[in-house]
Image (tube, rainbow, N blue to C red):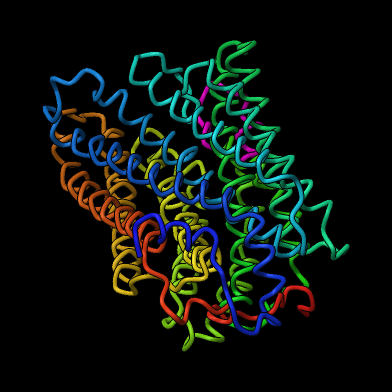
C-alpha cells in the first residue's frame, strides 16, 4: 500500500467480521478518533521537546559553559521551558486524551461535535507554542509553572474551557445515568483547573497581589496543578484501565468515595506547607502540614485499590504493556506520597527547603507517577483507535524500561542531592564552590536520567507514527482483533 493509503486505512478503516462484541466500542472510538489523535500526537511531540530542554538544563548544572554563547538557551530560559512544556504540553494533552476516552466509553455516547473539540485542542497547543516563543524572547513571568507571557493566559483559558465544555457535554449525553468513580475524578479535575488557573492569573498577572502573598498563591497553584488536575486524571485512568486490562474488578471499589472527597479536601491546602519559615503567618504553613498528613487517608485507600488489584493478576501484567505502566505508576505513587507527606514537616524543610529536593519530588510526580500512567493509557487507546496491534513489542518494552530507569535516576539524583545540598548550605562554614562540587555527581546522574527519558520519548513518537503508517494486515480487517473486558466498573462491588 502507498503512504496515503496507509494513513487513510488507519483513520477510516473498513472492517469486517462479527462486530457483536465490539460494535458499541468501535462506534464510540470512531466518533472521537480525530481529537484523540490530535491530543496523543501533540503530547508525544511536546514530550520530546520537553526532555530536550530538560537535558540542556541538567547539563548546565554541572557544565555551565554548555551552549553558553546561545542567548535563547541560557539556564534561566531552558529551565522554565522544560517545566512548562512538560506540564502544559505533555501532561495536559496526554491526560485530556485519557479523560475524553474514558468519559466517552463510560457514558456510552459522544457529546459535543468533535470539530469544536478539535479546534479547542489546536488552540491549546497554539497557546503553548506561543508561550515557548515568548519565553525564548525574554518575556517570561517570574512565577513557577506560570512563566508564559501574560498574553498566553487568556488563550490557554479559552482553549481549556472549550475542551472542558466538550467533556461536560459528553458526560451529560451519557446513556448510563449513574456516574462512576473515574468520571468523578475527571470532572473534579476539569472544574478544579479552571478555578485554580483563573485565580492564579487574576492574583498574579491581572491584578497582582502584594508582597509575600504572591509566593503563597504561586505555591498553592503549583501544588494544585498536580493535586487537583494531574493526579485526579491519573487516578481515573488507573481505575478504568485495571478492569479493562486484567478482566477483574477493582478491589475496595466501594471505598472510592472516601478517597475522592478526602483527596480533594486535603490536596487543595497541602501546597502551602512549602512556605514554612517563609514570610507568611505560621498558622498558614501549619494548615499545609496538617493537610499533607490528611493525605494519608486517600493515599492508603488508593494504594490498596491499585496495588491489590494489580498483584491479584500479577501473572497477566507482563503480557500487557498497559498493565506494566500502571503497576510502575502505582508503586511510584506510593513512594511519591511518602516524600510529599513527610517532606512537609518543618524538620524536613529545615534541610530541604532551598535545595533541589522539591524539583526531584515534582519530577517523580510528573515523569514517574503521571507519566507512567498516561503512557500506559495511550498504549491502550492507540490500538483501539486504529484497530491495529502495537507495531513492535520491542519498542514498547524499550520505552517502558528507559522511562522507568530515567525516572529513577532523575529522582535519586535530585532528591538525594537535595538533601546533601540542604545539609551543606546549613553549615555555618559552608563554601559555595565546595557545595557545587559536592553536588556534581547528583547532577550527572540527573543528566543521565534525562537522556534515558529523552530516548523513551523518541520510542513513543516512533510507536505513534509506526502504527499510523503501517500496512493493515489481514487480521486487522476484523473488528474482533482487539479483545477487551467489558465495562466492569458498572458492576464493581
Residue 401, given in percent of the width and then of the height, sits at: 31, 67
Asked if residue 290 can be seen in this view, the reply is no
- Left or right placement of residue 24 versus residue 205 in this view: right
Q: Is residue 354 above or below residue 344?
A: above
Residue 387, given in percent of the width and then of the height, sits at: 52, 70
**What secondary structure characterizes most of the magenta part?**
helix
Instruction: Give the residue displayed 44% in from the left and 74% down from the top.
Output: 389
Residue 391, given in percent of the width and then of the height, sits at: 36, 70
Q: Is residue 461 above or below residue 239?
A: above
Asked if the magenta segment contains residue 282, the reply would be yes
Asked if residue 83 can be seen in this view, the reply is yes
Instruction: Give the residue displayed 29% in from the left and 73% down from the top.
Output: 394
Residue 402: image quadrant is bottom left
- Furthest toward the bottom, the residue is 315
Residue 101: image quadrant is bottom right
**Which one is in front, 477 or 457?**
477
Residue 280: image quadrant is top right
Residue 152, given in percent of the width and then of the height, sits at: 53, 21
- Left or right placement of residue 191 versus residue 36 in this view: right
**Which one is in front, 173 or 233?**
173
Q: Which residues are magenta?
A: 274-288
Asked if the magenta segment contains residue 161, the reply would be no
Instruction: Give the residue displayed 65% in from the left and 27% down from the top.
Output: 158
Amino acid at each position: 500500500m502507498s503512504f496515503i493509503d496507509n494513513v487513510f486505512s488507519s483513520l477510516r478503516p473498513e472492517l469486517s467480521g462479527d462486530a457483536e462484541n465490539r460494535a458499541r466500542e468501535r462506534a464510540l472510538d470512531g466518533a472521537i478518533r480525530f481529537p484523540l489523535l490530535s491530543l496523543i500526537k501533540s503530547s508525544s511531540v511536546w514530550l520530546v521537546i520537553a526532555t530536550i530542554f530538560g537535558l540542556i538544563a541538567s547539563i548546565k548544572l554541572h557544565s555551565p559553559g554548555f551552549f553558553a554563547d546561545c542567548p535563547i538557551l541560557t539556564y534561566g530560559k531552558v529551565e522554565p521551558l522544560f517545566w512548562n512544556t512538560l506540564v502544559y504540553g505533555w501532561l495536559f494533552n496526554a491526560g485530556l486524551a485519557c479523560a475524553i476516552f474514558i468519559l466517552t466509553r463510560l457514558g456510552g455516547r459522544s457529546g459535543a461535535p468533535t470539530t469544536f473539540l478539535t479546534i479547542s485542542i489546536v488552540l491549546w497547543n497554539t497557546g503553548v507554542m506561543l508561550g515557548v516563543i515568548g519565553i525564548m524572547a525574554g518575556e517570561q513571568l517570574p512565577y513557577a509553572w506560570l512563566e508564559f507571557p501574560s498574553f498566553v493566559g487568556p488563550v490557554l483559558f479559552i482553549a481549556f474551557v472549550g475542551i472542558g465544555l466538550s467533556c461536560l457535554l459528553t458526560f451529560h449525553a451519557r446513556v448510563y445515568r449513574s456516574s462512576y468513580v473515574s468520571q468523578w475524578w475527571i470532572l473534579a479535575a476539569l472544574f478544579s483547573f479552571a478555578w485554580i488557573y483563573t485565580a492564579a492569573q487574576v492574583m498574579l498577572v491581572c491584578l497582582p497581589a502584594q508582597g509575600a502573598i504572591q509566593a503563597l498563591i504561586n505555591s498553592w497553584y503549583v501544588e494544585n496543578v498536580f493535586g487537583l488536575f494531574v493526579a485526579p486524571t491519573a487516578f481515573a485512568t488507573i481505575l478504568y484501565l485495571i478492569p479493562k486490562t486484567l478482566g477483574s474488578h477493582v478491589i475496595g471499589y466501594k471505598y472510592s468515595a472516601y478517597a475522592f472527597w478526602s483527596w480533594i479536601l486535603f490536596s487543595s491546602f497541602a501546597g502551602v506547607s512549602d512556605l514554612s519559615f517563609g514570610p507568611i503567618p505560621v498558622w498558614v504553613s501549619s494548615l499545609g502540614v496538617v493537610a499533607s498528613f490528611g493525605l494519608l487517608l486517600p493515599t492508603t485507600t488508593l494504594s490498596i485499590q491499585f496495588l491489590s488489584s494489580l498483584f491479584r493478576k500479577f501473572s497477566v501484567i507482563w503480557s500487557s504493556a498497559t498493565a506494566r505502566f500502571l503497576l510502575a505508576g502505582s508503586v511510584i505513587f506510593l513512594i511519591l506520597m511518602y516524600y510529599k507527606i513527610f517532606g512537609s514537616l518543618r524538620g524536613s524543610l529545615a534541610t530541604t527547603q532551598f535545595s533541589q529536593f522539591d524539583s526531584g519530588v515534582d519530577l517523580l510526580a510528573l515523569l514517574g507517577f503521571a507519566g507512567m500512567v498516561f503512557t500506559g493509557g495511550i498504549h491502550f487507546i492507540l490500538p483501539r483507535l486504529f484497530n491495529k496491534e502495537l507495531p513492535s513489542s520491542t519498542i514498547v518494552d524499550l520505552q517502558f524500561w528507559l522511562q522507568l530507569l530515567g525516572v529513577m535516576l532523575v529522582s535519586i539524583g535530585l532528591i538525594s542531592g537535595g538533601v546533601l545540598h540542604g545539609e551543606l548550605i546549613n553549615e555555618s562554614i559552608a563554601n559555595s564552590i565546595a557545595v557545587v562540587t559536592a553536588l556534581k555527581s547528583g547532577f550527572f546522574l540527573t543528566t543521565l536520567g534525562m537522556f534515558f527519558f529523552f530516548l523513551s520519548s523518541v520510542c513513543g513518537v516512533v510507536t505513534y507514527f509506526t502504527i499510523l503508517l503501517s500496512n493493515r494486515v489481514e487480521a486487522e480487517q476484523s473488528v474482533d482483533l482487539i479483545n477487551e473486558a467489558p465495562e466492569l466498573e458498572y458492576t464493581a462491588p
